[in-house]
Image (cartoon, helix red, strand yellow):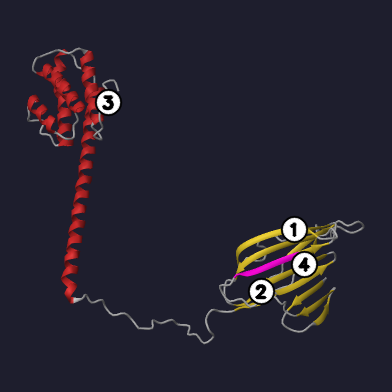
Amino acid sequence: MRIRIATTGGLSTLVFGIGVLQVGGVAANDELEAAAETGPVEAIVRLSPSEPMIGDALTLELEVRARPNVELLMPEFGEALDRFAILDFTRSETADDEGGTISRQRYTLAPPHSGSQAIPPLLVEFVDRRPGRDSAPEGEDAYELLTAVLEFEVTSALADDAPVEFRAPLGELGPFVMPGRYRWLWILTAVVVLAAAALCGIRVWALWQSRTRRRSAYDVARGDLDALIMAPRPNDRQMDAFFVQLSGIIRRYLENRFGLRSPELTTEEFLDELAKSPDLVRSHQRLLREFLNRADLVKFAHLVPDASDVEVSLDSARRFLESTRDNAIMGPAGA
């Protein structure tokens, strides 16, 4: 294995193990470069700029050249570079003039802090498929090649003699003093804003109370009506009490739901009040008129309705509750 590292010094040679280490000069384009070679594969790592400042983006390029019939296994994305923030990554692969392979990986990195930094060794694996060669070492899947470590210094944005503690140049701010000529204007503005906020809050609270009351009125009336629907149907002697109970459910609902004084009014007076209510459309008023007139015929004219009249009255009451639950406009009678 042979490793070459480009630095700022002269050229020297160190022999170790099975390889040769050569130390050379910095490249002309302000980058650090280190090359390592094992058998048919050569790997070169380049880093620029060689003297970055904190906040600068670093460009790291790994270029691996392999002879023909040698399969390259490049490092996985971000392998051994987890200490840096990876801003961008590209890879490419081409063939040289002799039929070999040239694979490149280019990273854009951000150093985490200033001071001494280092690009750790990157692992390149390869399988030698040339005739008469062992494809991999005995007991292994592939040969391994580690690139050299690239050490560099990240300059701080602060000067060496900059103070560590930051202080306000003008000292602490004093208490806010309201100008005398605008003091009453500020006070008046604050009063107006507070009054508007209080009025808005009161209106929202009243609307919420109204909606809560309306929902409760429907729930009570619908519960009473469901109990009456589930009860046995009245016989002839029970018709009067049945219709009194049914009309009472609707009248109490109208009083709680719309604020109409229904219990103490006669049917005609009550119908006149209905005509003045902005919450009830004509279809609601017509349905109530038919329902109350039918109930009065039973209570005062001693009309004995049959079973179909009872079901029609119950259905009318149910339809009225559902159609006025959310101030909905009623559809056709068969809806």
Give the number of the mark in front: 3 or 1: 1
Packing grade of label 3 (10 A; few <14, some 14-19, many >=20) is few
Q: Quadrant of residue 128?
A: bottom right
Q: Residue 118 shows which numbered tag?
A: 2
Between the C-alphas of marks 3 and 1, the distance is 73 Å
Q: Are marks 4 and 3 in contact (CB under 8 Å)?
A: no
- Label 2 residue SS: strand
Between the C-alphas of marks 4 and 3, the distance is 83 Å
Residue 288 among magenta residues: no
Q: Please name the residue that numbered disc 3 is placed on.
A: 331
> Residue placed at 17% from the left, 58% from the top?
195
Packing grade of label 2 (10 A; few <14, some 14-19, many >=20) is some
Amino acid type at mark 2 = Ala
Between the C-alphas of marks 1 and 2, the distance is 26 Å
Q: Earlier in the sequence, mark 4 or mark 3?
A: 4
Please determine whether, in this image, residue 30 is positioned above or below residue 237. Answer: below
Give the number of the mark in front: 1 or 4: 1
Between the C-alphas of marks 4 and 2, the distance is 18 Å
Q: Earlier in the sequence, mark 2 or mark 3?
A: 2
Q: Please name the residue that numbered disc 1 is placed on.
A: 93
Asked if residue 308 can be seen in this view, the reply is yes
* Range covered by the magenta-colored residues: 57-63
Give the number of the mark in front: 2 or 3: 3
